[in-house]
Image: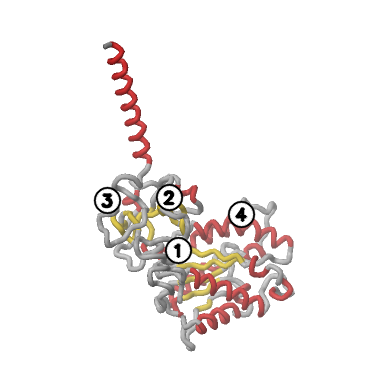
Amino acid sequence: MRLSKAKSRTARLLIALACVFGCRAEKADPTGGETHFLTRCDPANADACGAPLQCVCGVCTLPCAERATCRALPTAQCVPSSAVPGCVAPTTSGICDVACVSDADCSEVSASHHCAQGVCRAGASVPWSAGGAAGAGGATSMGGEPSAGADAGANACVGGAVEANQVLVLGDSFFAFSHQITAYLEALARDAGAISAGERYRDRSDLIGNALALAGNGIADQYASGVSEAPVKVVIMNGGGADALLGSCDVVDSRCPLIADAATAAQQLLAKMAADQVQHVVYVFYPDPGDPKVRAKVDALRPLIQSVCESAPLPCHWLDLRPVFAGHYPQYIQSDQLNPTDAGSKASAQAIWDTLQVSCIAQ
């Protein structure tokens, strides 16, 4: 009889311990039970997310107008709905979301969340524009339009959502030396039927006043001028080359004030674009400069700007031109070892157009 009671007490203890550890595990995972925070959802199934979450922009979250709304959700911030992947027709000005650079940034949400195009989402760790499911509606780009590889009857982008005048080009001499990159890009868009013969993108890139931070915020001024003239939905830009060319560092690394200031200025500019409801940014970064000293500064700046782009509060598409120019530098770069030839401009425009097509931007 005593043995039976001992066994009974042991069994109850094991059950209690299992409950304790089980409860702790469930509490640590906010995507379980009735929450499903940042899990993709179908708006047609209103109860899928579980109260108080709602299916907004194809994801289980909370609508918000201020950061305080998101405090109860792990690492979440209130971001503009227009900057959310898959948000076709926002019904609220903002939602609670979690930005990321890699899957590790999503671990505080849950082990099942992955970084997809700069935001944390439950499910496959692939960008939406590369075929990730958007609820039950198939693949979408970061602007909410069907991607070029989408299934379920959506095999092409839906055109006409962005007018040519709503595309703004910003940058330094790499774009502005001849403006041929924009001209070739417009030709590709016309050939594809994305813009008509009389339409043009607005190219505000300049040979002077074109740094991110050095000697004033020239690229930010270009943007301010452009957005004051007309609404902007898509920005195609470079930036940082003028800072690296004209500035100096005692030690060339990420701690150099020149490089750190440029990265900070880029971060602030992208935040301003997000606040202005810009839908997409394509950040075009340079091929290798010929001067070793300039190249060292550009090499130190590149990963910082890439991180700024990938963690931006709006969809920012990173385009590194080094693979495009590899093996073609004699044909693609002028004797100044910085700016593109006509052939280099044409190759750059093609790379930008490919990026726009893959992500279904301004088609």
Numbered disc 1: secondary structure: loop
Along the line of sight, the residue nearer the viewer: 317 or 238: 317
Q: Which residue is mark 3?
A: 50
* Label 4 secondary element: helix
Residue 308 appears at what percent x and percent y? Answer: 52, 58
* Residue 31 image position (x, y, % from top left): 35, 47
* Residue position marked by numbered label 4 in the rendering: 257
Along the polypeptide, which appears first: circle 1 or circle 2?
A: 2
Q: Which residue is mark 1?
A: 131
Q: Quadrant of residue 205?
A: bottom right
Q: Are marks 1 and 2 in contact (CB under 8 Å)?
A: no
Mark seen at residue 142:
none
Q: Which residue extends farthest top?
A: 2
The residue under the point 39% across, 50% down is 76
Q: Is residue 145 something one can see in this rendering?
A: yes
Q: Which residue is mark 2?
A: 113
Front position in the image: 203 or 311: 311
Specify which label sits upstream in the sequence, 4 or 3: 3
C-alpha separation, residue under disc 4 versus residue under disc 3: 48 Å
First in sequence, mark 2 or 4: give its number: 2
